[in-house]
Image (cartoon, rainbow, N blue to C red):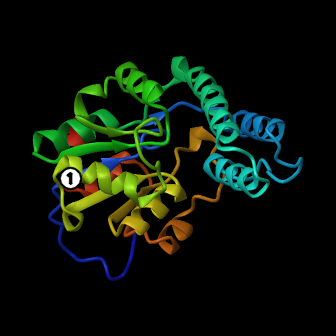
């Protein structure tokens, strides 16, 4: 585990822990490149100049860029809404194709069971669709641990907007100084930093084939208080290692 030198020597008094889903708790190997390509194709069909959007951008940045370009070009609201409806249907469909190969990340069931047993409030904040998130939780046996869930299908801004995390914590009844967000992507770190919520990073699972950009150094630079290799190490950080080992 990598931590800041200023990290206190005692375990913080957390009340609620919010998790990212894909890559953090479940492994699904989404075809993100295909999703990005489809969003770009639809954006260009609606009037965005070819070449303005590139595959190296995350999906939410592609969407933001497309929306801004269409507004600058004077596209009517109806056209922008049609673009958003079309790209949402397209990436929802691609996302659901990953469901048959989605599995729980090692250590997830044991960690969540012990956190709930000890009285932590657990929530889920994901950029996955509501349909995929619910189905993935059922398929991996993790659905009993999350009474609170916000996805990109939920009303209001999606992650990394701080409103997404703040709204979820409000629903959970958890004050910011007693909240923790756990994720495996720099978008998660950005969301936590903008929300002023403590963030612990879990490095991407080696089997996911995620690019090397999500390194411990980059997570710490983005504001993470600690970086763990995997969920069993996170369990150690949260003081529930004994239960994780016994599972």
Please give the name of the residue rendered at 22% of the width and 34% of the height, measured from the top-left corner.
147
Above or below, comparing residue 6 to residue 247 in the picture: below
SS label for mark 1:
strand
Q: Quadrant of residue 24?
A: top left
- Residue identifier under label 1: 16
Please give the name of the residue rendered at 48% of the width and 32% of the height, measured from the top-left corner.
129
Please give the name of the residue rendered at 11% of the width and 39% of the height, measured from the top-left corner.
117
Above or below, comparing residue 28 to residue 53 in the picture: above
Residue 235 visible from this viewpoint: no
Of 23 and 75, nearer the camera is: 75
Horizontal side of residue 93 vs 122, given as left or right: right
Q: Quadrant of the N terminus?
A: bottom left
**Residue 145 in the image: x percent, y percent?**
24, 33
Q: Quadrant of the C terminus?
A: top left
Above or below, comparing residue 212 to residue 151 in the picture: below
**Residue 49 in the image: x percent, y percent?**
87, 49
């Amino acid at each position: 585990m990598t931590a800041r030198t200023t990290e206190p020597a005692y375990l913080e008094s957390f009340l609620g822990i919010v998790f990212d889903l894909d890559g953090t708790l479940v492994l699904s190997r989404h075809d993100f490149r295909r999703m990005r390509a489809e969003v770009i194709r639809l954006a260009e069909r609606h009037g965005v100049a070819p070449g303005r959007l590139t595959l190296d951008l995350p999906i939410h940045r592609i969407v933001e860029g497309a929306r801004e370009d269409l507004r600058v070009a004077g596209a009517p609201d109806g056209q922008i809404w049609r673009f958003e409806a079309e790209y949402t249907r397209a990436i929802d469909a691609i996302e659901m194709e990953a469901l048959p190969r989605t599995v729980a990340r090692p250590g997830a069931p044991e960690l969540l069971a012990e956190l709930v047993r000890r009285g932590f409030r657990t929530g889920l904040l994901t950029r996955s669709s509501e349909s995929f998130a619910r189905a993935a939780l059922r398929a991996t046996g993790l659905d009993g641990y999350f009474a609170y869930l916000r996805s990109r299908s939920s009303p209001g801004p999606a992650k990394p907007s701080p409103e997404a995390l703040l709204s979820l914590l409000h629903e959970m009844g958890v004050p910011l100084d007693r909240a923790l967000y756990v994720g495996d992507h720099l978008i998660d770190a950005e969301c936590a930093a903008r929300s002023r919520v403590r963030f612990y990073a879990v490095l991407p699972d080696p089997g996911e084939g995620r690019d090397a950009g999500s390194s411990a150094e980059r997570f710490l630079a983005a504001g993470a208080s600690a970086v763990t290799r995997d969920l069993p190490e996170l369990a150690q950080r949260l003081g529930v290692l004994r239960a994780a080992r016994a599972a």
